[in-house]
Image: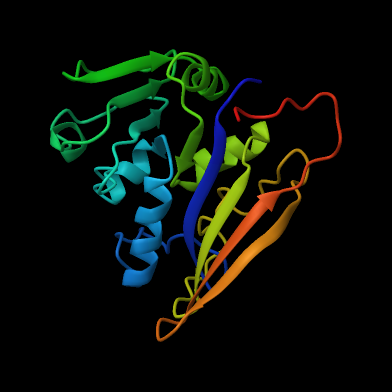
Amino acid sequence: MRRPRISTNLAVSLDGKISPAGGLPSGWTSRADHARLLDLRRNADALLVGRGTLEADNMTLTAPGSSPLRCVVSRSGAFRPEHPLFYTPGGAVHLLVGNDGDAPVIPGATIHRGDLAEFLRILADDLRIERLHCEGGGELIRELADLDVIDEFHLTVAAHALFGGTGAVTPTGIPAAFLKASRTFELASIERVDGADECFLSYRRTRPDSPQWLPSVS
């Protein structure tokens, strides 16, 4: 499958959850984590989030000094035209809506219909995106993992938080919903944040030498 090189970035609690029951607004991690988030955005040609994450964190998907494309996925297409994303200067906005979704007309936003795999091909072939960076949520990252298209996985482990709960969302969705097959990653770097009880981890996907896997855009 022709696609960009894909990275993800999430903050997780000590017990591996991305949010407690009822959700949690952005800003629960340190300033150093926010600075890291912006660095990862600046190194991307396009950013990707699910609509639920966009709404929960009131995201505008901007990156100071850079203008990556801003891409949002929603099966239903239930976007709010008044959302700040559509009024904040930045990269062009591309919305992926399921074939059965009913998206409103939003001036300046390009709407695509279909599945995630086809959207990744469009990003690579039609929009010439080489580096795509995803910031969640768990369901979207789960879909990327099912497609086996994640090349880099960046985590901020926030040891100051313990969310708990058997139904709490993890980086790949709800616990016990296993992937079709395990994905193997190697630790590329680790950095402890002084005074923040946080640790930055970066992983690279290690892939079997298989002729069925096509390399990403280089």
Q: Is residue 136 above or below residue 216?
A: below
Query: What residue do we see at 52% from left, 66% from top?
Result: 165
Chosen colour scheme? rainbow
Q: Residue 55 at what x, y percent from top left?
A: 28, 43
Residue 80 position by quadrant? top left
Residue 77 visible (yes or no) = no
Q: Residue 156 at what x, y percent from top left?
A: 49, 65
Query: What residue do we see at 22% from left, 36% from top?
Result: 90
Number of marks in the rendered image: 0
Q: Is residue 24 above or below residue 43?
A: below
Q: Residue 108 at what x, y percent from top left?
A: 19, 20
With 182 as the anchor, is 1 left or right in this view?
A: left
Quadrant in which the C terminus is drawn: top right
Q: Is residue 25 above or below residue 80?
A: below
With 187 as the anchor, is 168 left or right in this view?
A: left
Q: Residue 88 at what x, y percent from top left?
A: 15, 38
Foreground pick, 82 / 5:
5
Query: What residue do we see at 29% from left, 42% from top?
Result: 66
Foreground pick, 102 / 207:
207
Residue 44 visible (yes or no) = yes
Quadrant in which the N terminus is drawn: top right
